[in-house]
Amino acid sequence: MPVADAKDGPTIPKREAEGMDRSRHMEDELREQNQRFSAAVENMSHGLCMFDADERMIICNGNYLNIFCLEASVIRPGIRFLDILRHSVDIGIASQTADELYAIRKPYIDQAKPSTYEETLSDGRIVSISHRPLALGGWVSIYEDITEQRRAQEDLKEQHRRFDAALANMSQGLLMYGADGKMIVRNRRFLELYNVTAADFPLGTTHREALERLLELGIYTEIDVDSEVAKTEACLTAAKMHS
């Protein structure tokens, strides 16, 4: 039966009206999905950029533009990947030429395999890039500025180097135990004072085991291990109570 419109205009067949309703409903759902997807991409903590099989950009988020200091007026959907690299060179953020950068990326693109690599920018920042191929061609890349993370790692390495140097140059022997009561540090001077090897006192040894080993090696001839362990535990308990 024909369906009359609200203004008493031409009637529309019922099936056609239902089809139009379904089409509008699908368009609304698609629009909502796109809006949710765009919101999710834009609110990511990392940069994201997606490319199609022709190496043209589909979408990117604000963090991607910020990481590479790119201009939103230039980096628009449809721009070629190589042109993005050229733009990064033009604005001085890239530390290599566009062709050099493209040559680095091209194997990852052609192999269509997940991969992660790093790029150092002209200002010294380090960016981790996770490349993930798409089923229908193209790829999506996730970008993370890991400069501070790397600096923290290098600072920690330097602290360890200084700590090791201090231990190696101490005039006293030193054994250090962790919260679980197992040895975590043993300096060279300790080994020299007792004329023992690192294998005699491996890391992970408990205080009791160390004392028993000193007895076995004849370094200590008269020592009550239980009493010494009890004294140490009492000192630790007292220190905790006053901390």
Image (cartoon, grey):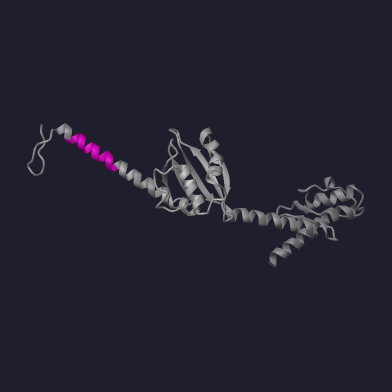
Indicate the quadrant where residue 116 lies.
top right
Residue 25 in magenta stretch: yes
Name the residue furthest left. 8
**Above or below, 93 relative to 32:** below
Q: Residue at x 31, y 41 (%)?
A: 30
Residue 23 in magenta stretch: yes
Q: Is residue 12 left or right of residue 150?
A: left
Indicate the quadrant where residue 104 lies.
top right
**Above or below, 199 relative to 237:** above
In the foreground, 103 or 243: 103
Q: Which residues are magenta?
A: 17-28
In the foreground, 159 or 196: 159
What is the x, y in percent for residue 163? 75, 58
In the foreground, 124 or 63: 124
Q: Residue at x 50, y 39 (%)?
A: 132
Q: Quadrant of the N terminus?
A: top left
Q: Residue at x 53, y 50 (%)?
A: 144
What is the x, y in percent for residue 137? 45, 34
What is the x, y in percent for residue 12? 12, 35
In the foreground, 98 or 162: 98
Q: How many marks?
A: 0
What is the x, y in percent for residue 68? 50, 52
**Above or below, 19 relative to 202:** above
Q: Quadrant of the C terminus?
A: bottom right
Q: Is residue 86 left or right of residue 158?
A: left
Q: Is residue 50 left or right of residue 155?
A: left
